[in-house]
Image: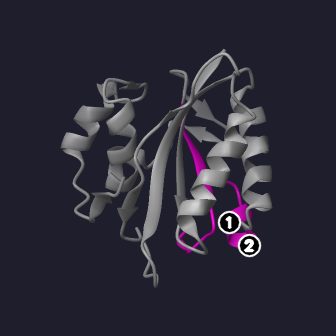
Amino acid sequence: MNRAVLLLGSNKGDSESILKIAVAALSSLANPQSKMVLSSIYESEPWGFDADRWFLNMAVIMETPMSAGELLSEILKIEARLGRVRDKTQSRSLREVRSAYNSREIDIDIILFNSEIIQEDSLIVPHPRMHLRRFVLEPIVQIAPDDIHPGFNLTLLRLLEKCKDTSVVRRLS
């Protein structure tokens, strides 16, 4: 069984409902013998672009029999069902620099997968910018403060303490 740490985000539509629907869809990919662990929902200002609405974010830890690539494939299907439209900028290789961030109904990122370091065109784990983003670290640290980042060999709590991001992140529930 594999352990995945995911971050969900939304700032279009009924974001709270979309997050709940996404969690329900993710549960169908999880090991039915284990419980998914959910963080609170956090509100965070947009990172890297201006938007009319702030994001709602939450972290999920799940056990799954799927590989990281299989999980990503299913996550992309869930995002599409929930209204996520990926434009050409977003469909490029993850290795390419993307300067265009935008509002979205749902975004589901694989932040950690076991303690693996994955470097593929379509998937990079750990998420390459997680340590720079308070909106990623706050919800994950709530439910997995002692997890180790396999590249930095630091706990997630320590990464949060070292994070220089000053953007506002508020726990809602």
- In the rendered structure, which amino acid carries the disc numbered 1? Gln
The structure residue drawn at horizontal position 41% and vertical position 46%, both measured from the top left corner, is 130
Residue interval drawn in magenta: 85-112
Drawn side of residue 31 relative to residue 37, left or right: right
Distance from the alpha carbon under mark 1 to that under mark 2? 5 Å
The residue under the point 78% across, 33% down is 70
Which residue shows up at 66% across the image and 51% down it? 22
Tell me whether the residue at label 1 lies in contact with that at label 2, contact meaning CB atoms closer than 8 angstroms.
yes
As displayed, is residue 125 above or below residue 96? above
For the view shown, which residue lies furthest in the bottom direction?
52
Indicate left or right for 75 with 46 as reference: right
Identify the coloring: one colour
The percent position of residue 151, horizontal first and vertical second, equals: 41, 29
**Residue 87 — which label?**
2
Q: Residue at x 72, y 57 (%)?
A: 79
Dot 1 falls on a residue whose secondary structure is helix
Residue 35, image x and y in percent? 57, 24
Q: Using the rendered image of the protein, determine whether residue 14 is visible from the camera's viewpoint.
A: yes
Residue 121 image point, x, y percent? 70, 45
